[in-house]
Amino acid sequence: MILKETELQGAFVVDLEEKHDHRGFFARTFCGKEFEQHGLKPVVAQCNLSYNYKKGTLRGMHYQIAPAAETKLIRCTKGSIYDVIIDMRPESPTFLQHFGVELSADNRRALYVPEMFAHGYQALTDDAEVVYQVGEFYTPGYERGLRYNDPFFNIQWPLEVTEISEKDMNWPLLRATVVGGTV
């Protein structure tokens, strides 16, 4: 694996280090020791699969707060997505900054998302499939979210949003989140 830290402290793009031969290639997609060496949490509590029928589908921006804050390792296994994270850690030098990257079956890239980062993505192709390794169990009482189109962040989604859940469409704007004390 080749781990490259993004401009958001603690978030990494994970590229494969492919070992090729006449059969194809082999690559490690996860290694607890390598993650620890980079200061990352290698805990996997759950693995989730998300399937998206239509390009333009948007899921996010989700995160969980302590004591159920979760890390994620996101990989697109079919089609492609535009994945976005927002640093929600008040003590971080990259607090409230966001980062986006294309993950696809073709580039085989993954994104490591630290605790207290809001996460969401948009399907860039029909039939996009996404696999998540998650470091904490889903705990509804600790779930938080931000509006995908919050003007504060001005995230430039590549496509028009064609499908989104009612819940994701109605997450609060950052101003309401901060005033409400949920960051």
Image: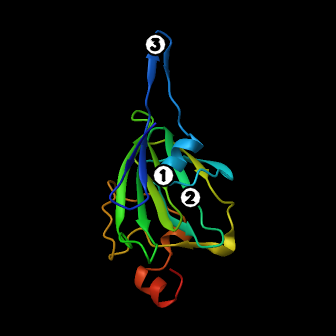
Q: Check the image and name the residue furthest to the top.
A: 22
The image position of residue 128, as x and y in percent, is: 49, 43
The residue carrying pointer 1 sits among few (fewer than 14), some (14 to 19) or many (20 or more) residues within 10 Å by Cα, namely many
Query: Are circles 2 and 1 on residues that touch, CB within 8 Å?
Result: yes
- On screen, residue 182 versus residue 85, left or right, reads right
What amino acid does circle 2 point to?
Thr
Counting the numbered discs, the total is 3
Residue 181 drawn at (x, y percent): 52, 87
Residue bearing the label numbered 2: 71
Task: Identify the residue position indicated by label 1 in the image.
Answer: 112
Q: CA distance from mark 3 to mark 1?
A: 28 Å
- Residue 168, above or below 80: below
For marks 2 and 1, the one nearer the N-term is 2
Depicted 89 relative to depicted 54: above or below:
below
- Give SS at disc 3: strand
Callout 1 amino acid: Tyr
Looking at the image, which is closer to me, 76 or 160? 76
SS label for mark 1: strand
